[in-house]
Amino acid sequence: MSPSWPCEDGASWRGPSARARKRARHARWGTGPAVAVQSCKAMALAHGYGDEQKADVILTLKPLEGPPLPPLLLHSYALRQSEFFEARLSERWASEGGAKPLEITLDKCGDANTYVRCIQLLYVPDRVKHNSFANVQDALGILEVAAELLFHNCVSACMRYLEAVPWTAENEAAVKACVSNLHLQASPDLAARMRIFDSYSISRPVDVMKDVLGELLSLVTNGAPSKARDITERVLLANVQPCSSSAFAAVNEVSLFNVLHGNLEQLKIQLRKFVNFFSWNAHQVTIACSALRWLFDELFALQIADVAVRMLSEEQELAQLMVSRIYQNPFTETLFHILVSILQALQRGEVLSPRPVRLALITTWLPVVAKLGNDGGLDNFGKDTVTAQLHTSLEDGLGAVVETLPMADQEMIFKIWIAVCLKCRKAWPDLSEAFDSWCSKLRLAQRESEVHMIQEASAKSSEANCASVVRTDHETNNNVDLHGGGDL
């Protein structure tokens, strides 16, 4: 069954509200966290999986127990991404004189359904492979199959996902065991977290789209009516449909990030006026804040928010402006909403930012959030239902992202938290759960170190005792020989 896409005339996008339209866009692309497993097949179908007419390989999977699965009709161009299938295809076509379709059988499949999902990932673009994992255990299952099939891009996607999402204690043990048992070379950041030290006609349409999209985005970010936003959202989504060129997806990224950069610069101009008590344009700030939230929503919906997260993590000037004059700061609410969106996306694995970006995001904005929340004159902050939910979401997101970082990075963050947050009356945000977990790991590491030292000392003592016994026996034998020689 092929996936459904928005109609060209836009009829499918007419709904009762912007929220309903946003839900429809999520449902079409499977960007919601609860549909990761289902979206794997949907994305594979969108890129050729299941096309029986063009299939040239028949693959049969035989599980360890039970009957074989129904044969899969696949395509050699996708299978060749796996070195295992590349070798099998080259060998079979050489021996059979290029006869098609080829029949290949995989015996002793542990979990045949996991093999099917891994094979579906051969059709999924690398930039969205990580959205196919429901949780850590699911990614580990895919990793085992991908390693067996020598599907290196999928192995990399699994490691990228595992390095960036929160773990339980059981998850951590499972990740370490899996990487060790498979004899895989972990990525540097995953290893650190596991504490392992060891032509013109073709380009012109793209240029036209870039100009048109630039004009639409300029309208939206300058306060255009909701109709302009609806049209812009349809264009952005259509640019990443399977029938569209990959160059159009690149247009999305370039255009959105250029507008995001300009929006941040405009916001900083107004905040400088606000900080220095100059005449600032409250209407422009309102428009800029609304546009900024919309831009981040679109980046998340299109699954390209990782660059925006990095941009915000590097905004030292904006962070300084936010705390230079905190009372009735017009950007506070927008900042909190954007940070909640980013932290929740990181927590759910929808955005996989590298370790340095996650560290910079927390160290840059934790002091700002604490200052605004504790001393910003927000007397009702956390009291009504909406702000209470925002309050809790910020705390939960900060704590979860902190726990994705190595111990040394967490030490840096908790020193900031102690110095900035705990001295305030509200002591907000409360990261005590993450702090207790970090302290517990420190104590465990110390116990492991002491046990290791005791074992080493015991081994050295045993070696010394053995050497002493050998010397004593040798000296006794020498004395007996000398005594015996005297009697002769």
Image: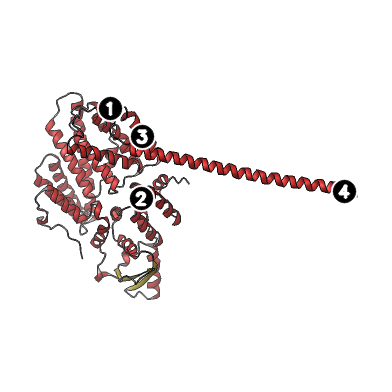
Mark 1–mark 2 contact, CB under 8 Å? no
Residue designated by label 1 = 425
Q: Residue at x 19, y 50 (%)?
A: 207
Q: How far apart, in angstroms, are the residues tagged by discs 1 and 4?
A: 91 Å
- CA–CA distance between discs 1 and 2? 37 Å
In terms of sequence position, does the residue under pointer 2 or pointer 4 come before the other?
2
Q: Is residue 243 left or right of residue 424?
A: left
x and y, in percent, of residue 325 in the image: 22, 26
Q: Residues within 10 Å of mark 3 (few under 14, many from 20)?
A: some
Disc 4 is placed on an element classified as helix
Tell me the amino acid under the disc marked 2: Leu
Going 32% across and 35% down the picture, which residue do you hit?
A: 363
Any part of residue 141 in sight: yes
Mark 2 or 4: the one toward you: 4
Q: CA distance from mark 1 to mark 3?
A: 18 Å
Distance between mark 4 and mark 3 Cα atoms: 76 Å
The kind of secondary structure element at disc 2 is: helix
Q: Amino acid at mark 1?
A: Arg
Residue 121 sits in which quadrant?
bottom left
Q: Earlier in the sequence, mark 4 or mark 3?
A: 3
Residue shown at 49% from the left, 43% from the top: 448
> Which part of the image, by quadrant, shows the N terminus?
bottom left
Element under label 1? loop
Tell me which numbered mark, 1 or 2, is placed earlier along the sequence. 2
- Give how far across and how far down residue 91 sits, in percent: 40, 70
**Amino acid at dot 3:** Phe
Q: Gap between marks 3 and 2, in whole Å? A: 23 Å
Q: Which residue is mark 4?
A: 485
Which residue shows up at 16% across the image and 47% down it?
A: 213
Horizontally, residue 280 falls left or right of residue 164, namely left
Which numbered circle lies on residue 162? 2
